[in-house]
Image: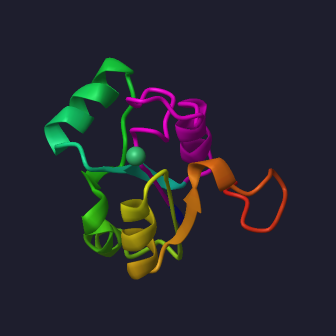
Amino acid sequence: MVLLSLDIDGTMEVGDPPGWIPLEWIHRAKAKGYVVGSASDRTKTDQRLLWERHGIELDFIDHKHKLDEVKARFPETTRWIHIGDGEADALYATKHGFEFHFVDAVPEEGSPGWIF
Ligand SMILES: [Mg+2]
């Protein structure tokens, strides 16, 4: 099972600043049975309010420096991916054994490393 972790600001279309990853990706991930959530520098409350505003229910909402804890909460997962736009994203994701992609370098659909 795949766990997909998404940064918000600079990454998601609803971020501040907005990134290019559409909310549709969350629905797509859920439809495939992925565990999907956000891992941001924002407070959990702020993240929760943002997702509520957009009518999105996630499997987790946490901080990017706690990706190890997120991973531990879903022992059934075998592939872990984090997408973000900053060095902190890269640092914590790789430190905790996630595949990491900068938002502007997500693998092309169908190519190795493709998210879906
Ligand atoms: Mg960001």
Vertical position of residue 89 compared to residue 57: above or below:
below
Front position in the image: 75 or 96: 96
29 shown above or below 63? above
Q: Position of residue 34 (x, y in %)?
A: 53, 55
Q: Which quarter of the rendering shows the N terminus? A: bottom right
The quadrant holding residue 102 is bottom right
Residue 101 included in the magenta stretch of the image: no
- The image quadrant of residue 73 is bottom left
Left or right: where does residue 53 sit relative to residue 20? left
Q: Which residues are magenta?
A: 4-33
In the displayed structure, would residue 87 be above or below residue 52? below
User: Is residue 9 a member of the stretch shown in magenta?
Assistant: yes
Query: Quadrant of residue 51 in the image?
Result: top left
Residue lying furthest right: 110
**What x and y, as percent, mark residue 33?**
56, 53
The mark total stands at: 0
Answer yes or no: is residue 96 visible: no
By secondary structure, the bulk of the magenta-drawn segment is best described as loop
- Residue 22 in percent (x, y) is at 58, 31
Which of these two is toward me, 79 or 32? 79
The answer to whether residue 26 is above or below residue 94 is: above
Q: Residue furthest top?
A: 53
* Residue in the picture at 25% in, 67% down: 66
